[in-house]
Image (cartoon, helix red, strand yellow):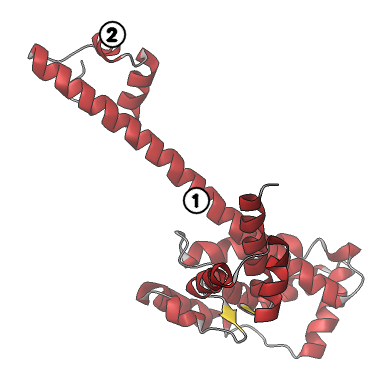
Amino acid sequence: MNREELFAKTLEQVQRTAAEQGNCVSEAQVMEAFAPLSLDSGQMQLVFDYLVKHKVGIGEPVDLDDYLTDKEKSYLQNYLDQIELLPSYTSGEKEAVTLSAMAGEADAQRRLIEIYLRDVVDIAKIYTGQGVFLEDLIGEGNMALTVGVTMLGSMETPGEADGMLGKLIMDAMEEHIRENVDRERVDKRALDRVNKVLKKAKALSEELKRKVTVEELAAETGMSENTIRDAVRISGFQIEYIE
C-alpha cells in the first residue's frame, strides 16, 4: 500500500471510528491513527479541518441536525413522529430483548428492530451530504437491521450484538453511497460519449448539408460504429443529425 492509499484508508477509518462514537473523536485518537504517516503540523491541521468539514466532532459531538436541509428535516420529523408511537424500552429491557433475539425468538427479533430504529436515524444523519437521500440511507439501514437481528446467534453478549448491528447498518449505508458514486460516474461517462457523438455528427451534417449515417460518422471521426450506435441508443435516439 503506497502512502496515498494509506492516508485515504486511515482517514476513512477515523471517520468510521467517529461514527461508532457518536460522530466524535478525540485529538489524541486522530494523532495516533496518523502517526505511521509522520505528518507535519500543517498536514495534521488539514486533516482536522477535513474532519470538521465532514461533520466529525473533535473532542465533542457536533449537532448533525444543523447539516440537514429543510426537506430532510421535514421528512425526518414525520418519520420520528411515527417511531415515537412504538413502545419504549429501558436499558435492562433492551438487554433482555437482545438476549432473546440472540436465542432466535422471532418476537424478540421484531422488538429489537423497533428498538434500533432510532439508532438507524442517528447513523443516517452522519452520512448525509454525500449525494444520497436521507430517506434512502434510513431505508438501507433498516433493511440491514432486519437481516441483522436474525444473525445474532453467534454473539456471546448483548454488547457484541449491539456492535454487530451497528456495523451492519453503517456498512449498508456506506455501500449505498459507493454504489451511488459509481452509478454517477457511469452516467457521466455515458453523457460525455453522447455529447461527443452529437458534436461530431452535427459538424459532419453541416458540412454535408444532410443527415449522416453511422458508417460515415465512424469513417470521418475514427470512432467505432458500436460506440456511435450506443450513444444514439443512450440518447433515446434523439441525435437528429444521424439517420
- From the image, state whether disc 1 or disc 2 is nearer to you: 2
| Residue closest to the far front | 40
Rendered location of residue 189, percent (x, y): 40, 36
Give the percent coordinates (x, y) of residue 209.
7, 14
Q: Residues within 10 Å of mark 1 (few under 14, many from 20)?
A: some
> In the rendered structure, which amino acid carries the disc numbered 2?
Ala
What residue is disc 1 on?
180
Distance between the Cα atoms at labels 1 and 2? 36 Å
Picture quadrant where residue 111 is located: bottom right
Query: Which of disc 2 and disc 1 is earlier in sequence?
Result: 1
Query: In the shown orientation, is residue 28 left or right of residue 76?
Result: right
Q: Indicate the quadrant containing the C terminus: top left, top right, bottom left or bottom right.
A: top left
Describe the element under mark 1 as helix, strand or loop: helix
In the picture as drawn, the residue positioned furthest to the right comes out as 156
Relative image position of residue 98 (x, y in whole percent): 82, 76
Tag 2: Cα neighbours inside 10 Å, few (<14), some, or many (≥20)?
few
Left or right for 187, reference 50: left
Instruction: Name the residue beneath numbered marker 2.
Output: 219
Residue at screen point 32% across, 13% down:
222
Q: Residue, x 54% and y 67% (percent of image)?
A: 127
- Check disc 1 and give the amino acid type: Asn
Q: Which is more toward the observer, 17 or 93?
A: 17
Q: Residue at x 67, y 54 (%)?
A: 6
As helix, strand or loop, the secondary structure at mark 2 comes to helix
Q: Is residue 236 visible?
A: no
Specify whether 139 is left or right of 210.
Answer: right
Q: Residue at x 68, y 88 (%)?
A: 88
| Image mark for residue 18 | none
